[in-house]
Image (cartoon, rainbow, N blue to C red):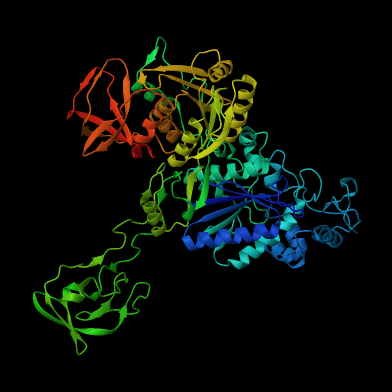
Amino acid sequence: MTPFDRFVMVDWSGGNDTGPTPRKDAIWIGEAGAEPRYMRNRALAEEALSDRIERSLTAGERLMIGFDFPFGYPAGFAGALTGRSDPFAVWGWLTERIEDSPKANNRFDVAGGINRALGNGRGPFWANGLSRDIDGLPRRKDSYLNPFPEKRCSETLCKGAFTCWQLAGAGAVGSQVLMGLPVLERLRRRFAGHVAVWPFEPLERPVAFVEIWPGLINPAVRAATGPNDIRDAVQVALLAEGLSALDPARLLAMLSIDAPEEGWILGLGFEQELMPPVTLQPPPLRNDCFALPAGVDWTPVDAALDLLRKGLHPVTGRETVPLMQAAGRVLAEDVAARRANPPTANTAVDGYGFASAAIGAGPQSLPLVPGRAAAGVPFGGTVPPGHALRVLTGAALPPGVDTVVLDEDVRVGDGRIAFHGPLKPGANTRKAGEDVAKGDIALKQGRVLTPADLALAAATGYGDLPVRERLRVAVISTGDELADPGSFASDAQIFDANRPMLLSMIARFGFEPVDMGRVPDNRDTLRATLDAASGRAHVILTSGGASAGDEDHVSALLHEAGAMQEWRIALKPGRPLALGLWQDTPVFGLPGNPVAALVCTLIFARPAMSLLAGAGWTEPQGFTVPAAFSKSKKPGRREYLRARIRDGRAEVFKSEGSGRISGLSWAEGLVELPDAAAKISPGDPVRYIPYASFGL
C-alpha cells in the first residue's frame, strides 16, 4: 500500500544523554516540510515517535519512519542466538535484556554475554568502549574471532558502511543497533496491528518502519551543509524531503526487496533518484537578478516591477507548525482534504427525518421511531420506510433517512407527526463532501493563511500545516545626520523616522522585522552591519546612501561586492533605488527621504518580499474614484500622491514636498497617476490605492 502521506527520518544514537544544546552525534528527527528536531536521549525520542504515530493514526494518514541502523544482523546470527531465523526474535531477546536510562545502559555487558555464549568469548562483537574490562568483549579487532559474516549483503554494496559488530569508535553502528531495536520493538508492541516493518512484513498497515542509511545521499548532504549546520540534522531532513518528493512508482520499486532475515537499506541502488529533489533551501539568487537590459537608463515603473518579478524566487525554508499558530503564514504546499466536509450526510435543521419515497403531496402522517439523532450522538438503528425520526441540526442521517421536514412545519402527537407534502428529496440535509470531498485540494500552495483557512484545514482533518518559514527582513538606517528617536539631537541632526516606520510596515505585512539599528557614514561599520544582517535575515532594507554621492556607502559597498544595480526609476517620489546582493541576500537600498522610502517600499519592496516569502507576486488592489483635486502632470514619470477618501472622492495632501512626513500620517492611501502627461480636474476618475491593499 503506497504512497505514504508523511515521511519521518531518524538519526539514532547509542550513547548517553547529550544535554540541552543541539549537537552532533545525537538523535535528530527530520520530517518532510518541517525543521529537524533534536532529541537529547532515547527516552525523549521514543516518546516523540509515539506521539507522531498517534497523530498520524488519528489523522488517518500513512506514515513512513526511517531509522539509520540495521534492522537485522548477518545471516545465521538470529538462529544462533534465539533458535529461530527470525529478526523479530532478536528484537524480543534484546528487549528483555537491554537496560537503558538517559545516563547509563548495559549494551557492552549484553554484547559480552552474547560473545561468551556464541563465540567462546571472542566474537562476534568487539570494541569495548568502557574503562572497565568486560569478559568476552575485546577492545580491538586484533583479538577478535567472528563466527558470522562480517557484513550483511546490503552493507557489502554500500561504500563506507560499517559492520554492526563494532560497538565503539569512529563510524561504529553496533551500539545503535543494540539500543535501537528494543525501542522499535516497544513501539511495535504499543501500536500492534498498526505497524509493519520493512522488508520483514507486507506494508499493509498505516505505519511503516524502514531502515535507512544517509550515506546514500552524501553528495547532497555535503552541498546542503553550511559551516554552522549540524550534519546529522541536515541529512535526515534531506532524506525525508527526497522520499516525500519521489514518484510513488519509484518508491514502490525501492520497497520491492526480499531480505527476510538480514533486512535491507531503503534506496540502495536508487541513490541518484533520491538526490535530485532533496533540498531544504532554495538556491541563492543569481548576481544578475537586478540587472537592467543593455542600454536602459531610466526605468519605467512597470518595467522595473517586471524585472523584479522575473529575477527573484522564494528564499524561505519550510516547517510544520500547529494549526493554531498558522494564521498569517504562507502555505508551503497544496493541502488536500484528509476527510470530507461534512464527513457524512447530516441534517441542516432541527426537525424530523424520513425517506422521501414514503410521502407524497397533501397532508402526511408518519409514526415516530423511538429515539433521536443529534450532532455527535448518532442514532444507532435504521429508520423503517414510512416512519420518521427526531433529528437535530448537524446530526448524521441514519440509514432510512434522506429528507428532513422543519420543526415549524410539523405537528406532533400520539407518537406521530403530521405535515403537508410534498418535500423535495434531500430537503434540509447536507450531502457528505458537498463542501469539500476527501482528496480535493482544500488550500493552495503560496496562500497566506487566514482565520477562515484555518477553519477549513481543521474541518478537513489537519492539526498542523506545512508553511514557509516567516520571511525575516532586516532594516538599516544610514547617515551621520541621524539621531535615535527620543535621544538628544543637535541642530545639524534629524531624528531617524525611517527605521520605526519600516520595521512596523514589515510586521504589518506579516514578515519578521530585524532591527539592525542606525549606522553612521563609516564604510567599515556599514560593511560589518550588512554582514550581520545577511546572517540574520532573508532580505535587507536600507534607507539613505542609495545614490551616487560621496557619502552614499550603501551603493559603494554593493558595487564593491560586484552585485549592484542602481535603478533610476521614472517615479516621483523616490527616483534612486539601489538593488543588489550582499552575501546572496537581496538588498533594497531605499531613498533616505521618508516619503520616498515609504512609496518605494510599497511599490517595489512589498511585492518582491511577498515573492521571496513564497506567497507569489502581489498586486495592490486599486479603485477608480472621482478626484477632489486639480493637477497638471508632465510626461515621463509615474507619480504617487498621498491621498485619502472623503465623501466618496480622493483628496490629496496640500503639498507634494517629499520631506513632509505629516502627509504620510494624514494619508490613508496613494493616488497613482500614469506615466503620460495628465490634466486632472475635480470629478475626473483617478486610481486610488488604499494602504490596506498593501497589507498596512
Report how many numbered discs are placed on residues in the image: 0
In the picture, measured across the screen, residue 238 lies left or right of residue 643, that is right
Looking at the picture, tell me which residue is in the foreground, 339 or 153. Answer: 339
Residue at (70% x, 66% y) in the render: 92
Query: Where's residue 333, x and y in %?
Result: 44, 44
The single residue placed furthest to the left in the displayed view is 362
Residue at (43% x, 16% y) in the render: 292
In the picture, measured across the screen, residue 245 lies left or right of residue 661, that is right
Which picture quadrant has residue 607?
Answer: top left
Query: Where's residue 312, x and y in %?
Result: 45, 28
Residue at (18% x, 28% y) in the render: 682
Looking at the picture, tell me which residue is in the foreground, 174 or 142. Answer: 174
> Is residue 174 shown to the viewer in this render?
yes
Query: Where's residue 562, x and y in %?
Result: 56, 16
In the picture, measured across the screen, residue 445 lies left or right of residue 266, that is left
In the picture, measured across the screen, residue 251 lies left or right of residue 188, that is left
Quadrant where the C terminus lies?
top left
Looking at the picture, tell me which residue is in the foreground, 405 or 292. Answer: 292
Query: Where's residue 285, x and y in %?
Result: 51, 27
Looking at the picture, tell me which residue is in the foreground, 290 or 376. Answer: 290
Q: Is residue 199 above or below residue 667?
A: below
Residue at (27% x, 22% y) in the render: 674
Which picture quadrant has residue 605?
Answer: top left
Q: Is residue 541 above or below residue 234?
A: above
The single residue placed furthest to the front in the displayed view is 491
Q: Is residue 419 above or below residue 617?
A: below
> Is residue 86 shown to the viewer in this render?
no
The single residue placed furthest to the top in the displayed view is 295
